[in-house]
Image (spheres, helix red, strand yellow):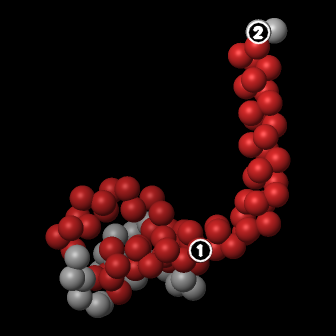
Amino acid sequence: MSWWGALRRRLRAAREIYEGMFVAPYRAQIYREYLEQRDLFLLAGFSDLLGAPNPVAFYTLELYPDLIEQFHQWHLRMGMERPPEGGFRCC
């Protein structure tokens, strides 16, 4: 085994130790914050479906194809059994 392989193994082990000590205890909190930020972004993007005027509709129009895949999980997480009326069907 070359010394590059040994160095790569040691760096990988050091990264795993670092993640275990500093990142792992906060992983759930980081994920909850990520979900909260994503839900807020989806709310801003799809607020016109909920009946609120969307001030950023023109700017988020290009993002709709990417966001449509996440819309179903979002409305279920927000407590809506069915998607809001006046839009598209995801269920």
Q: Residue at x 75, y 23 (%)?
A: 7
Q: Secondary structure at mark 2?
A: loop
- Tell which of 15 and 28 is nearer to you: 15
N-term-proximal mark, 2 vs 1: 2
Question: Where does label 2 land, which residue?
Answer: 2
Q: Quadrant of residue 22?
A: bottom right
Image position, residue 83 (x, y; %): 44, 78
Horizontally, residue 28 falls left or right of residue 67, namely right
Question: Where does label 1 land, which residue?
Answer: 33
Horizontally, residue 58 falls left or right of residue 77, namely left
Q: Amino acid at mark 1?
A: Glu
Work out whether residue 76 can be spotted. Answer: no
Q: Which mark is residue 13?
A: none
- Tell which of 53 and 75 is nearer to you: 53
Q: Residue at x 33, y 82 (%)?
A: 47
Q: Residue at x 79, y 40 (%)?
A: 14
Work out whether residue 4 can be spotted. Answer: yes
Image position, residue 44 (x, y; %): 35, 79
Q: Secondary structure at mark 1?
A: helix
Image position, residue 12 (x, y; %): 75, 35
Q: Quadrant of residue 77?
A: bottom right
How many tags in the picture? 2
- Which label sits in the foreground, 2 or 1? 2
Q: Amino acid at mark 2?
A: Ser
Q: Quadrant of the N terminus?
A: top right
Image position, residue 52 (x, y; %): 29, 90
| Residue furthest top in the image | 1
| Residue furthest bottom in the image | 52
**Residue 3 higher or lower than 64, as above or below:** above
Q: Quadrant of residue 59?
A: bottom left
